[in-house]
Amino acid sequence: MTGIDAIEQIASPAERAKEIGKRLGDIPGFQAKLRQMRQAAILEMRASGMTYGAIAAEIGLHRNRIQQIAEGRTAGGQGGDKESNPDKPPTPRKAASRTKKTA
């Protein structure tokens, strides 16, 4: 974000808060545009012959996430953006331990 340091320099707390509120209101639009730009870049890489795996290795995301982005899906198609960071590679799950309880 450009000018974010300048906001801290605004002397009036009220004016500073107004400017921050304005910038926060702009975030959804920025996010949507950035998602579109990222999808277009990935589709361009696919059109050049790269596989999802090769794109993932180059960008640093999981292969499945690259495919989701290319298809325009968020949060794995789970019906909404439920993850705080859908770009983070999945964390392996540990198997539940099966210990016997003794009486």
Image (tube, rainbow, N blue to C red):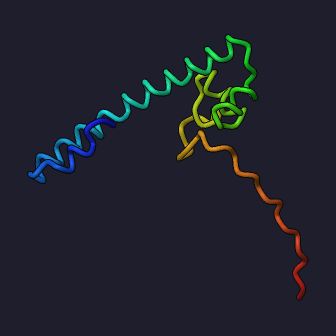
Residue depicted at x 11% and y 46%: 15
- Left or right: residue 58 versus residue 84 is right
- Left or right: residue 75 versus residue 10 is right
Above or below, 16 against 70 in this view is below
Between 76 and 65, the one nearer to me in the picture: 65
Between 76 and 86, the one nearer to me in the picture: 86
Where residue 41 sits, quadrant-wise, is top right
Between 22 and 10, the one nearer to me in the picture: 10
Residue depicted at x 61% and y 27%: 69
Residue found at the very far bottom of the displayed protein:
103
Q: Residue 46's x, y, as percent? A: 68, 16
Residue found at the very far left of the displayed protein:
12
Residue depicted at x 84% and y 68%: 97
Residue depicted at x 67% and y 31%: 58
- Left or right: residue 4 versus residue 96 is left
Above or below, 58 against 44 in this view is below
Where residue 76 sits, quadrant-wise, is top right
Q: Residue 7's x, y, as percent? A: 21, 45
Q: How many marks?
A: 0
- Left or right: residue 81 versus residue 14 is right
Quarter containing the N terminus = top left
Q: Residue 11's x, y, as percent? A: 10, 52
Q: Residue 42's x, y, as percent? A: 61, 21
Quarter containing the C terminus = bottom right
